[in-house]
Image (spheres, rainbow, N blue to C red):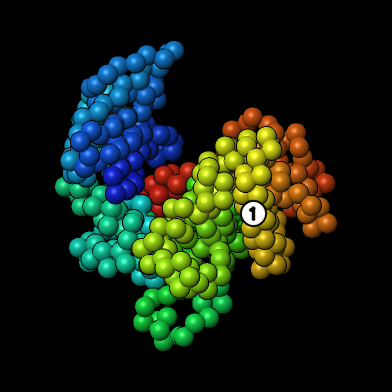
């Protein structure tokens, strides 16, 4: 057996997944939250249901659910809790030993453009790049260090969100500011969600039964964070996120694109400092800023019920989304497929239908019945006479990370 342990370390959380790669079967998943707080939250999922470290027990139907609420001091403690969960509830790590531990790292800058075996030098570079992703890279690095202590005998591989976008041409990644200043301060478009965009574009080619290197695909990763990507022959040639994950589409709490002079104006007129502007654009904008609701389901429900603020928020969201679809149709010179993925993209019938409405003259036609289907897997939602295939493809970043890890070792 060739098991890969994939971990995603946040500042106060640890997600993990154990995947047996011979059949690409998920053996277990887990989520440890509130790391560093007085009360932690632990959940461990196996094929038979959801269990956790010993704690309050709850039975729902045929599944057993246990939730632990013990304190988890730091990431090292989180890995000990994870190992305890495997020992108590399975599957056995002794019988399914990971041959590699894969780590999601948000920002690789220009230095990392492929999955990379973690060394001391790699860790130094991840730390150095933290200035480009201060909320993510330090937490990713904490997870790597803790994982190396927990699993010292196996290689650890970092897979970077930015790596897939290393193929962006200079015209796409260059900002039109002073070139020397930009170079000195590493200012350029990096792009994010690369692992998802890579997996979904590859899965789209498989679904359509066509070679990946022949396809022109627009991938719409729509979650609380959202990004669009133009993929030509399996290579990212344009993407909506930039130096940071703030640029591009309207998101749950992030503004996406806006005139840079807005910041100057708010500083001069409203007296907002840099930290306040950062909080405004990252935490109090997007759907939350426009409607007071960050969950797309709530926004759509309120908009359909006549709430004017929610209706405007949805219109702005869809306008920006349509803007990027049109832009990438131009960049690619036409598309073979448009693909929705991630939480909103996979689940919101309303967003999918409205986002591409009115594009029939561009050869894009959604079939309402197919779009409304409750089916959960990869599926076609365009009509038979649509020149562009429109699909829903569930993303699987953990599996993509696991595949890339095996390719390295």
In this figure, what is the number of numbered marks?
1
Residue at 37 percent of width and 14 percent of height = 59
Q: Position of residue 135 (x, y in %)?
A: 33, 56
Dot 1: within a 10 Å radius of its alpha carbon, few (fewer than 14), some, or many (20 or more) residues?
some
Q: Quadrant of the C terminus?
A: bottom left
Residue 160 in sight = no
Read off the residue under disc 1.
Answer: 316
Taking the image as shown, residue 303 lies to the left or right of residue 92, namely right
Taking the image as shown, residue 55 lies to the left or right of residue 102, namely left
Asked whether 117 or 209 is in front, the reply is 117
Asked whether 18 or 146 is in front, the reply is 146
Residue at 39 percent of width and 40 percent of height = 21
Taking the image as shown, residue 393 lies to the left or right of residue 79, namely right
Taking the image as shown, residue 146 lies to the left or right of residue 161, namely left
Q: Position of residue 109 (x, y in %)?
A: 38, 68
Residue at 66 percent of width and 68 percent of height = 331
Res 5 quadrant in image = top left
Q: In what element is the residue under mark 1?
A: helix
Q: Position of residue 121 (x, y in %)?
A: 22, 66
Residue 399 in sight = yes
Res 111 quadrant in image = bottom left
Q: Position of residue 377 (x, y in %)?
A: 59, 35
Asked whether 115 or 277 is in front, the reply is 277
Asked whether 265 or 14 is in front, the reply is 265
Residue at 17 percent of width and 40 percent of height = 73
Classify 92 as above or below 396.
above
Q: Quadrant of the N terminus?
A: top left
Classify 60 as above or below 94.
above
């Amino acid at each position: 057996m060739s098991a890969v342990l994939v971990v995603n370390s946040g500042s106060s959380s640890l997600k993990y997944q154990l995947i047996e790669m011979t059949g690409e079967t998920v053996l277990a998943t887990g989520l440890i939250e509130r790391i560093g707080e007085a009360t932690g939250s632990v959940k461990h999922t196996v094929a038979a249901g959801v269990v956790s470290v010993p704690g309050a027990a709850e039975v729902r139907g045929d599944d057993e659910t246990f939730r632990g609420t013990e304190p988890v001091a730091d990431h090292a403690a989180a890995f000990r809790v994870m190992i305890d969960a495997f020992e108590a509830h399975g599957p056995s790590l002794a019988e399914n030993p990971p041959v590699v531990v894969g780590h999601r790292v948000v920002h690789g800058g220009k230095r990392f453009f492929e999955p990379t075996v973690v060394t001391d030098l790699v860790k130094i570079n991840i730390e150095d790049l933290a200035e480009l992703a201060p909320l993510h890279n330090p937490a990713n690095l904490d997870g790597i260090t803790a994982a190396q202590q927990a699993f010292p005998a196996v290689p650890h591989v970092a897979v970077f969100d930015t790596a897939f976008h290393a193929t962006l041409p200079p015209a796409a990644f260059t900002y039109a500011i002073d070139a020397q200043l930009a170079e000195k301060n590493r200012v350029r478009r990096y792009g994010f969600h690369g692992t998802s965009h890579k997996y979904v574009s590859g899965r789209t080619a498989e679904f359509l039964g066509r070679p990946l290197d022949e396809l022109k695909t627009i991938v719409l990763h729509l979650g609380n964070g959202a990004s669009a990507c133009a993929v030509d022959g399996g290579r990212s040639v344009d993407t909506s996120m930039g130096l940071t994950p703030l640029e591009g589409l309207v998101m749950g709490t992030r503004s996406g694109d806006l005139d840079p002079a807005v910041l100057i104006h708010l500083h001069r007129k409203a007296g907002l400092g840099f930290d306040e502007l950062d909080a405004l654009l990252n935490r109090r904008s997007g759907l939350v800023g426009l409607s007071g609701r960050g969950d797309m389901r709530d926004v759509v429900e309120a908009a359909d019920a006549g709430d004017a603020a929610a209706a405007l928020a949805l219109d702005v969201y869809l306008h920006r989304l349509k803007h990027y679809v049109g832009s990438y149709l131009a960049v690619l010179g036409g598309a073979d497929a448009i693909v929705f993925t991630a939480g909103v993209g996979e689940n919101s019938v309303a967003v999918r239908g409205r986002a591409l409405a009115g594009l029939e003259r561009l050869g894009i036609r959604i079939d309402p019945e197919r779009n409304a289907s409750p089916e959960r897997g990869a599926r076609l939602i365009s009509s038979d006479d649509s020149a562009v295939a429109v699909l829903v493809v569930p993303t699987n970043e953990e599996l993509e990370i696991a595949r890339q890890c095996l390719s390295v070792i």
